[in-house]
Amino acid sequence: MAVSHLLFLPGDGIGPEVTNEVRRVVEWFNARGAGFEIEHDLVGGCAYEAHGQAVSDATMALASAADAVLFGAVGGPKWDRVPYEVRPEAGLLRLRKDLELFANLRPAICFTALAESSSLKRDLVEGLDIMIVRELTGGVYFGEPKVITDLGNGQKRAVDTQVYDTFEIERISRVAFELAAKRKNKVTSMDKRNVMRTGVLWNEVVSAVHEREYPGVELDHMLADAGGMQLVRAPKQFDVIVTDNLFGDMLSDIAAMLTGSIGMLPSASLGLPSAATGKRRALYEPVHGSAPDIAGKGIANPIAMIASFGMALRYSFNMSVEADLLDRAIAAALDDGLRTGDIAAPGTKTIGTAAMGTAIIEKLDRLSA
Ligand code: NAD
């Protein structure tokens, strides 16, 4: 049986608590023939304590060799004053940069049982299933020059540079088209071609990749501001949205909030396929942080982390049957009314992290029987 290597980087705060529930889910799949091997290592504040660095070179080597990295969360008040270069978040940034994880995938899925906790009306969000594909390593967050200059007359000038090359737009649009082909076959590309040169190039390159390589996938273009409006007006019109780093940052947060709690949101960051295996480099993580306010209490919602492993099954291991099963197990636990504190209605009964993990595993048992 082929062995798949998972590197777990649980990190700080609630990271280890929610990652532990994923370990149980992985063991469930292993007991039924999946061949996952798990290695653990340190990242973030705990790595700083151990090595004086937020991620060590040895950990980076493990991450590059792994088939997928499962990342918990990093940071906390304990490390607020450590030097900037070794702050916990630097570990995540190095992983993204060195593994060249240029495509950030954020699904916005609304579970029927949680439709009431959305800020939108039930019929607008019930059954929602969209995927935002955000370019993660280019654009205005990285473009040079990026400076504040003192003009000497009491004024300062700040400059950020939005820059995209053809290859960056090509590779992110390929990720979007490939995803859409496995979903509802529709991509909406969002840019600001009406006021930005990068938007003109974005639009041109996405269209060219579409025409040349993915003519069978439906493609629409939308201005990013109109896209923001459409996301809250009629979100179910979308399947896959592809956009740049800046617009993706905002649009994915808007989409996330359509679905309720931050404790429910998984994500994936993908890189180029490796020449040796053909597999994309990949890191899977919940959208939430280390939640120091609830860390150590055993009450964090593990669903975002478990659903991140579900994305790994789907996108790194081509195990969509198993990924669907896991998604159905999560939905079934929610349908039974089981809630961690973050998704419970005020005054209703809640369960803890491990109990939610157990409930999902019991549903896996039942659904696969
Ligand atoms: P956070 O996501 O950690 O917490 C925000 C709120 O949501 C808190 O009230 C928290 O209790 C709650 N929450 C988050 N995840 C939850 C879960 N799974 N179940 C139940 N409730 C949950 O964001 P923050 O408070 O702004 O940041 C805390 C620390 O995490 C900071 O040090 C920050 O830098 C770091 N952070 C790390 C990442 C990451 O590792 N990718 C992302 C965001 C923030």
Image (cartoon, rainbow, N blue to C red):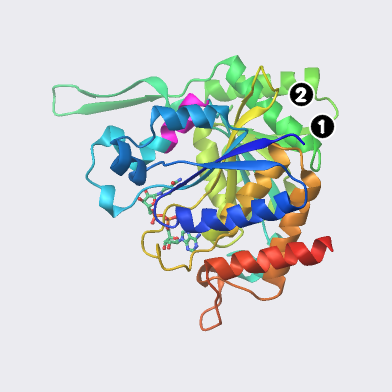
Classify residue 287 as left or right of residue 363: left
Please tell me the numbered disc located at residue 210: 2
In depth, the one of 64 and 163 nearer the eye is: 64
* Residue type marked 1: Val
Disc 1 residue crowd, few under 14, some 14–19, many 20+, Cα 10 Å: some
In depth, the one of 313 and 265 nearer the eye is: 313
In depth, the one of 5 and 305 nearer the eye is: 5
Quadrant of res 39: top right
What whole-number distance in Å separates the C-alpha atoms at marks 2 and 1? 8 Å
Q: Is residue 344 above or below residue 267?
A: below
Name the residue rendered at 82%, 32% in the picture: 217
Ligand 1 within 8 Å, label 2 CB: no
* Residue type marked 2: His
Question: Per the image, is 93 magenta?
Answer: yes
Give the x, y percent position of residue 21: 57, 58
The quarter of the image holding the C terminus is: bottom right
Question: Per the image, is 126 magenta?
Answer: no
Q: Is residue 21 above or below residue 41?
A: below
Looking at marks 2 and 1 on the same chain, the residue that comes earlier in the sequence is marked by 2
Name the residue tied to disc 1.
217
Give the x, y percent position of residue 218: 81, 34
Residue range (magenta): 92-99
User: Residues at badges 2 and 1 in contact (C-beta under 8 Å)?
Assistant: yes
The quarter of the image holding the N terminus is: top right
Classify residue 67 as left or right of residue 61: right
Name the residue rendered at 35%, 46% in the picture: 46
Q: Which residue reaches farthest left? A: 153
